[in-house]
Amino acid sequence: MASLAEPRQHRRRWPAPHVPWPLLAVLVLALISPADGVMRRDGEEQRSNAHGGFQFKHHDNAEVAEQLRRVSRACPDITNLYELGHRSVLGQPLWVLEITDRPGVHEQCE
């Protein structure tokens, strides 16, 4: 047993000793590079319509709510869209999109 007077051995926490550097570099590059987009001159990323026309950009609250409504209308058998009883600190409604095989039914432990 180590006594209190003995110095503690410091373990290297980063990089993790079991992760090879080349793999770590590839993962970092994959995360920061655009997957299927091209940067335009104005700084916005232009993406293909491979995702049903969804644009990967910052969406305001109205755009997010409209997209949730679209998903709910497109998949009514597995979704339930409702407004949470509370509002955000900015007074915006908070939406919940429930995706399940039994929308609107609370199932314990699920």
Image: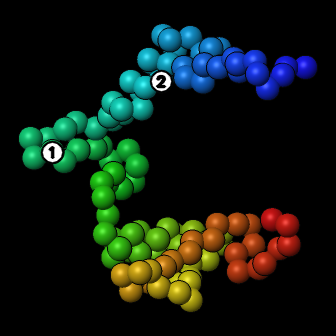
Name the image quarter holding residue 47: top left
Q: Position of residue 2 (x, y in %)?
A: 85, 20
N-terminal label among 2 and 1: 2
Q: Is label 2 in contact with label 1 (beta carbons under 8 Å)?
A: no
User: Residue 93, relative to residue 7: is it above or below?
Assistant: below
Image spot of residue 18 (x, y percent): 65, 14
Where is residue 27 drawn, in percent x and y?
47, 24
**Vertical placement of 53 versus 103: above or below?**
above
Q: Which residue is mark 1?
A: 43
The three-letter amino acid code for the residue at tag 2 is Leu
Name the residue rendered at 45%, 18% in the picture. Answer: 26
Q: Is residue 55 above or below residue 63?
A: above
Label 1 Cα neighbours within 10 Å, binned few <14 / some 14-19 / many ≥20: few
For the residues labelled 2 and 1, the Cα–Cα distance comes to 24 Å
Q: Quadrant of the N terminus?
A: top right
In front of the other: 60 or 98: 60
Residue drawn at point x = 60 percent, y = 19 percent: 12
Q: Which mark is residue 93?
A: none
Q: Quadrant of the C terminus?
A: bottom right
Residue at the image position 41 percent from the left and 81 percent from the top:
89
Question: Which element is circle 1 on?
Answer: loop
Residue 86 can be seen, yes or no: yes
User: Mark 2 highlights which residue?
Assistant: 27
